[in-house]
Image: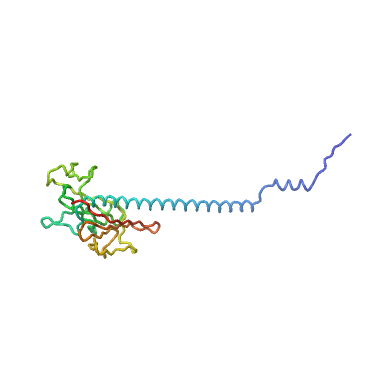
Amino acid sequence: MNLNIKSINWPDDLAASQHRRGFTLVELLLALVITGIVISLAGSGLYALMTADRRAQIETTDRLELEQALAFMTDEIKMSKQVLTSLPEVDGKAHFNDASGSSRVKPILILSPSANSGLTHPIVYYIADPPNSSVWIGPRVIYRWGPTLLQNGNYSDGNGKDLTTQPPGTPVNYYNEVLIDRISDRAATTANIACEPGYSNAMPGVTERAGFYACISADNKSVKLWMYKQSNPSFKSQSIDALVVTRSN
């Protein structure tokens, strides 16, 4: 009878047994701590990226709103005859009504319309506090007081009729509309708010300046404009300025 007895290699079997026994509690806790640190770092990095992206989007939107507002003003200035420094009066009263509920109203840009526009009263851009319980954030907004514009660039009488096709003296409806929101409550401390000698007509005076002001030339044919969006500790404040010249007679 032939018995084949397999010899036992004790060191190898002991090592295999230890390998199969799994992780200890200390090893598991250490792995959990490391995993938590990795997830925390990844989450912090993702939050930072999302915050930076949101900041960039807000700053881009603010800049775009300023550019659009300035483009609208620029077009209307070019259509005008003069940039005035005060509201003209008819029968002892200025043709200007600010928005209902607004306060701290300050006319900045007063445009005398061209002779062929069909208008007899000026168009006014002014800075003011937004009305209480309004959708506007503030602290200031820029309003436009004037007639509506048609798609062809001419003014409407308020009933959809082109004023250039209407007889002189046709009644025109003027409206208050917010042009841009979140205008700063004060001029930026770094801004050069003193008007140059050739543009010495300040609107308003230096001590009253907020986030929208102008310097008008002595001949009332050109104007320098400044606008500042409300600064935010988390976001870069936005500003814009331009020199615009009237082109109509």
Q: Is residue 19 above or below residue 193?
A: above
* Residue at x-position 29% and y-position 50%: 71
Residue 100 point in image, percent of width and height: 22, 53
* Residue at x-position 21% and y-position 61%: 218
Which color scheme did the rendering employ for the protein? rainbow
* Nearer to us in this view, 231 or 64: 64
Residue 58 point in image, percent of width and height: 38, 52
Residue 248 point in image, percent of width and height: 20, 51
Residue 59 point in image, percent of width and height: 38, 53
Quadrant, the N terminus: top right
Tell me if 240 is positioned left or right of 92 in this view: right
Residue 182, located in which quarter of the rendered image?
bottom left
* Nearer to us in this view, 117 or 187: 117
* Nearer to us in this view, 7 or 154: 154
Q: Which residue in the rendered view is the most extreme toward the top?
A: 1
Residue 162, located in which quarter of the rendered image?
top left
* Residue at x-position 20% and y-position 48%: 147
